[in-house]
Image (cartoon, grey):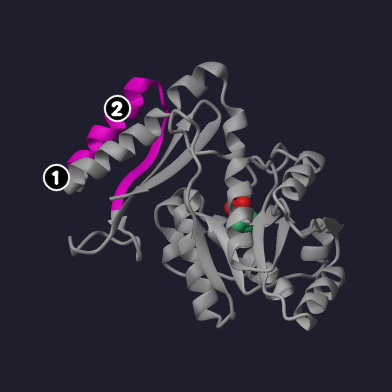
Amino acid sequence: MKTVRTIAELREHVRGWRKQDKTVGLVPTMGGLHAGHVSLVEQSRTCTDRTIATLFVNPTQFAPHEDFATYPRTEEDDRQMLEQAGTDLLFAPNVSEIYPDGHSTRVEVQSLSHILEGEFRPDFFTGVATVVTKLLLQALPDVAIFGEKDYQQLCVIKTLARDLDIPVRIIGGATVREADGLAMSSRNQYLTAEEREIAPVLFEAITQVAEKVRDGGSAADLRTWAEAKLTKAGFGAVDYVAVRDAQTLGPVRDASRPARVLAAAYLGRARLIDNVAV
Ligand code: PAF
């Protein structure tokens, strides 16, 4: 697996593969890799001939008070993991390659970016949408794969690819969980040993909410119930526990359409997010 740091080198590799009629998959990451990322690479390999992983801690998706400076940067370990998973090329650009001086364009997916996560992280999805649009246009893959763990992010990315006519198929990869149900995340490293014991309660709570919704429970009552469960377990602020239409992420108006339970809550300094299908 070769590592390249410039868009020109990335494009040269893709051009070579295209000449050989190879299909290309893209797995964007910010590093701090775990089995969830490996599963995305494996998924890409099942449906394309060549897989590119990207490693870029994207500054525009972090608010000034967030963890950009301390976000796990473990390039050598990440490289090894990606290579073992069968990645063909790693694109690991510097910030100036992606955002050269004078860069002033942002991509904003309206409305979807300002609900749920967007209420608590107002610029987050514009940062994600901007960098993902750039990565898609730089690599021009046939498919790009993003974890369902960040379900709203996946919806935002599907929307931008559709709205901007980017010729790529956006695919969601199933959330990979620890044995006790905690969704794998680079930010789980922020949990202390004691918090790590409590963390699976988030998955437990949203799974129970999904079951209760199926049994006809009201979304508002269930939110209160889930918040109380999380607080009792030792969680701090609960940003949201919401039952939404799985496609629009708006309120569920038609019970016959797929729905999703999404939640975000603090546990110590970690902010955990998770979601499950109803
Ligand atoms: O999910 C992530 O790791 C990031 O938000 C992404 C999609 C790589 C964009 O920086």
The label number, if any, that marks residue 175 in the structure image: none
The relative height of residue 82 versus residue 270 in the rendered view (above or below) is below
Query: Looking at numbered disc 2 in the image, what kind of residue is underneath it?
Result: Lys
Q: Which residues make up the magenta segment?
A: 221-243
Q: Report helix, strand or loop for mark 2.
A: helix
The relative height of residue 77 versus residue 94 in the rendered view (above or below) is above
Label 1: few (<14), some (14–19) or many (≥20) C-alpha neighbours in 10 Å: few
Q: Which residue is painted at 18% across and 48% down in the image?
A: 214
Identify the residue under disc 2. Answer: 229
Q: Report helix, strand or loop for mark 1.
A: loop
Q: Which residue is painted at 67% across and 74% down in the image?
A: 23
Judge by depth and name the residue closer to the eye, 148 or 125.
148
Residue 8 % position (x, y): 86, 73
Residue 137 % position (x, y): 69, 75
Residue 61 visible to the viewer: no
Q: Which residue is painted at 66% across and 64% down in the image?
A: 26
Residue 269 % position (x, y): 56, 29
Identify the residue under disc 1. Answer: 215
